[in-house]
Amino acid sequence: MSDSWAEVACHAPAAAVDILSSFLVELSGAGVCTENRQVDTFSVDGLDDGREATIRAYFPADDTLHIQVERVTAHLAELAAANPGWSFAAPEVTLVRQEEWAHSWKKYFKPFRVGERLVVKPTWEEYEAGEGDLILEIDPGMAFGTGSHETTKLCLETIEGICQRTGEFAALAYPAPASCLDVGTGSGILGIGAIKLGIPSVVGIDIDPEAVAVAVDNAVVNGVAGEMTVSTTPLERIDCTFDMVVANILAEELVRMATLLVERTAPGGFLILSGILTEKEPLVSAGFAPFRLSQLPPSREGEWSCLVYHREQ
């Protein structure tokens, strides 16, 4: 791993941040952040369409850096050409040391509320919990999952709805979920949230060993290590079913893994799918249409969607 990194900062209209940050996440293979706060990919909370945001992505400072900067510059030009009124300055490149990069983003990550009861708090921040608050202490490290991105928030809100029997779940007859499978667990935030909301047993899996280590640490910090098992076990090697399966990954991957995800959802259980750009909702819906699932109304925020299915008994 390189011990020196390059921060590539792009100044963009607020309306462009979702599409630009998604591009930067794919290109860099890591999260991005803004001047306001650090997020998994990007959140536009508190921004209005008239403001400019600064999106920062990080790349190894090696021989490939100039190629990556050229790709970012070309993408900005394409966005400007396709969207009258949008304009972009050339990306700003700053070299940072590995140690600086590992900690500098923390100033953007502050406590915030998700849903009715959940409060996501960085481990290094103070927060005075109110009555009924469920605190999720998270240090995302190098893993996806601070909870501030729309896809993660949508998942947490859905998990809360199922566990608390609110919203569209209030009219459904189902036993309290006793188990949850978190596919692509990242920082472990969804699994930890499920436990805090009353699910006694969670299995988290991720292909990234660094993410697994981060999730394990977060489970310990939150006092749920006894209820949460995390590993790099492939989904196809998980040989049991769960009352809840949650997968916050890319739309195309959800469709590719559809059979495995449905098979791991117990009869009467819930399947929560996120990481879906709203324009790709039809792709995911079509991918899960052949299965004996009841689709509940989707939830959306910004450019992102969360699809929820109830598996028939």
Image: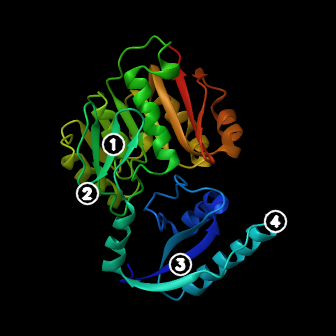
Return the x and y of residue 18 as percentages of the image width and height: 61, 57
Of the residues tagged 3 and 4, which is closer to the observer?
Answer: 4
Q: Which of marks 3 and 4 is nearer the N terminus?
A: 3
Residue bearing mark 1? 119
The 10 Å Cα crowd at callout 2, few under 14, some 14 to 19, many 20 or more, is few
Q: Earlier in the sequence, mark 2 or mark 3?
A: 3
| Whether label 3 touches label 4, CB < 8 Å | no
Which residue is farthest bottom?
63
Q: Can residue 64 be seen in this view?
A: no
Residue bearing mark 3? 8
Amino acid type for the residue under numbered disc 1? Val
Amino acid type for the residue under numbered disc 3? Val
Is residue 108 or residue 277 the one in the foreground?
Answer: 108
The 10 Å Cα crowd at callout 1, few under 14, some 14 to 19, many 20 or more, is many
Gap in Å between the C-alphas at discs 2 and 3?
A: 27 Å
Q: Which of marks 2 and 4 is nearer the N terminus?
A: 4
Is residue 139 or residue 115 the one in the foreground?
Answer: 115
| Whether label 4 touches label 1, CB < 8 Å | no
Gap in Å between the C-alphas at discs 2 and 4?
A: 41 Å
Q: Earlier in the sequence, mark 1 or mark 2?
A: 1
Q: Which of marks 1 and 3 is nearer the N terminus?
A: 3
Amino acid type for the residue under numbered disc 2? Glu
Residue bearing mark 2? 125
Of the residues tagged 1 and 3, which is closer to the observer?
Answer: 1
- Looking at the rendered structure, the secondary structure element under dot 3 is strand
Gap in Å between the C-alphas at discs 4 and 1?
A: 39 Å
Return the x and y of residue 103 as percentages of the image width and height: 32, 71
| Residue 167 placement, left or right of 104 | right
Amino acid type for the residue under numbered disc 4? Pro
